Amino acid sequence: MRLGPVLLVLLGLVADAAGAPAPIYRLDHPDRAPEFTDRPPQQLNPPVTLGAPSAFPALRAPRFDGESGAVPTAASPRSEPSSEAAPRPAITILSPGPGEAIRANNGAIPLSLALRPALTSEERLRLSLDGEVLRTAEAPPAMLEGLARGEHTLLIERLDQEGRALADAQRTFYVLRTALGRTP
């Protein structure tokens, strides 16, 4: 058993009892980990000053609702009165990706959107492809169909009940289709 660490602890307790903390020195060695000691080294290294110990509040265990057995959840921010305004409508095109080249010999391209918050019953989506309106719908279609090969620009607008744009997203992508019977 090594007496060094035990002796260091005992000296610390004696110093605490005396009211003055014992100085602790750090010895840096080039070939091994630093060493901490209460004995001053042959070189004059300044003592290490220790900060206050960190303390964290204890975690509370979840409480269970006696009737349903479910863990209660935090109240929804929408259920509490708040001075914050409603979230601003947003739309993001997830697929096709920006500049993505998609091989689709049938001209069908999968479409994926993110709508925050979800569409309300008064809102609509207007889809335009290459400057021409394709459709206005209550929900986004899963596929864009009948696309010719080449570059396409998709614009999706989120409209309110009066037809004003609340948000929009635009994406350029490429459709790759096999051309049969063509010679270069």
Image (tube, grey):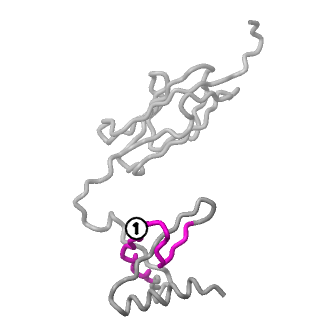
User: Is 39 situated left or right of 143 in this image?
Assistant: left
Quadrant of image for the N terminus:
bottom right
Q: Regarding mark 1 in the picture, which secondary structure is present there?
A: loop
Identify which residue, 125 or 102, lies in the foreground. 102
**Residue for badge 1:** 46
Find residue 96 and report its image quarter.
Answer: top right
Find residue 65 and report its image quarter.
Answer: bottom left
Counting from the top left corner in percent of width and height, residue 91 is at 42, 42
* Residue occupying image coordinates x 56% and y 83%: 5
Identify which residue, 21 or 105, lies in the foreground. 21
Q: Main secondary structure of the magenta part?
A: loop
Residue extent of the magenta highlight? 34-60
Quadrant of image for the C terminus:
top right
Identify which residue, 158 or 95, lies in the foreground. 95
Vertical order, 167 against 50 (above or below): above
Q: Residue furthest top?
A: 184
